[in-house]
Image: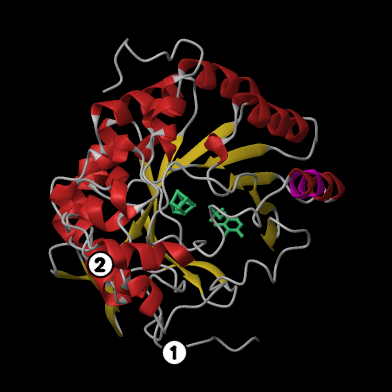
Amino acid sequence: MFNGTMNTRRRPLWKAILSRSIHTPEALPEFLGTSMPEVREVIRRYPMRINPYYLALIEQKGDPIYKQCIPDLREIRDERGMEDPLNEEGSSPVPGLTHRYPDRVLFLVSSRCAMYCRFCNRKRKVGTPFMVSRESIREGIRYIRKHKEIRDVLLSGGDPLLLENRELHAVLTELRAISHVEIIRIGTRVPCTLPQRVTQRLANMLKRFHPIYVHTHFNHPREITPQAALACRRLADAGIPLGCQTVLLKGVNDDIVTINTLMQRLLTIRVRPYYLFQADLAKGTAHFWTPLSKGLAIMEGLQGHTSGLCVPQFAVDLPGGGGKVPLLPQYVKGARESGLVIKNYQGEQYLYPFQESAFPHSGERSPT
Ligand SMILES: *Cc1c(COP(=O)(O)O)cnc(C)c1O
Ligand code: SF4
């Protein structure tokens, strides 16, 4: 599709691919059998964008790739989800910047993405002009400069890597000029949804701003293609540690085999699993929600059964703005006079001696 007959000499390949994205139901391939009136109704509220690279990963209607990108009527029928489940706007001192934790901020620098994920927790805003502006970026940088406690800036959006190289370069240059900013992180789904965006030129540019970390976002083993592997190799070869933030999604990846395979494959492309997120309670996404017990069961299915490097932290971002909290399967089974009873990954119980028997079931210790 993208051979030498297209004039891409001046325009990079990723822009050519992006410009051929599908935004209307009429442009969807017929074999998907998608209901056009339904899609039309949904995209009036939540835009659709599927670039031809990601579209080609769909094998059949309703598969895990299809579910992530094709609009579903349940998005506009959802009565349980919330508009701003994490209360990001409530912890925003300036628009587009969330300062919830003491030493780090979430800074939105782009409102566009290489595709619009149907489960997105910012779906009320992505792809709209209300998310980010030149002015909000300027104000965000001013805020970071003023607040010396900020040592870690996490760029997000939208997708920061949908900025032009020169725009991203300008933001990074400003941030690097602030002496208290120790590390810069980029949260991006581009290595998964439009890996062609990770050009050698981009990698060469990013490495001038070290220490840079990239958190990418893969949800299914079928997203790990040769193109995605090349994108990650370019970043890793530029000395950028790569992490992955996977979202647990019903019907997409909510089983042990899928997550286990995904985590193992991520390591083969030099990406270290970082978080496995409980899906946020965002409006229009309820059909993707899983019970917390599902995530805990998946974590038990990973820990001990495969390399520790494959095991992310299972985290829930508390509704209302409480922040991220890691959840762990319960390995401590009880307390005896002689110690704690702890089970291993195979469910066998062991006694760990020399513990105060009251721990951990006595609740809070009273101060002495
Ligand atoms: C997720 C998040 C961060 C980064 O959290 P880490 O646990 O350090 O990766 C920072 N600020 C906000 C508002 C976030 O949602
Ligand atoms: S790439 Fe990220 S921000 Fe963009 S639509 Fe997908 S989940 Fe949302």
Magenta highlight on residue 234: no
Q: Is residue 42 above or below residue 291?
A: above
- Give the magenta part as a residue range: 136-141
Residue 228, percent from left and from top: 32, 31
Q: Please tell me whether the stretch drawn in magenta is mainly helix, strand or loop.
A: helix
Could you tell me the amino acid type at mark 2?
Lys
Residue 6 as seen in the image, left or right of residue 324: left
Residue 32, percent from left and from top: 17, 52
- Residue linked to disc 1: 362
At x 30%, y 67%, the residue is: 38
Marks 1 and 2, the one that precedes in the sequence: 2
Ligand 2 neighbours mark 2 (CB distance < 8 Å): no
- For the residues labelled 1 and 2, the Cα–Cα distance comes to 36 Å
Circle 2 packing at 10 Å, graded few (<14), some (14-19), many (20+), is: some
Which residue occupies the extreme right position in the image?
Answer: 146
Coloring applied to the structure:
secondary structure
Quadrant of the rendered image containing residue 67: bottom left
Badge 1 element: loop
Would you say residue 305 is visible in this rendering?
A: no
Residue 84, percent from left and from top: 57, 72
Residue 127, percent from left and from top: 54, 52
Quadrant of the rendered image containing residue 316: bottom left
Q: Is residue 231 above or below residue 129?
A: above
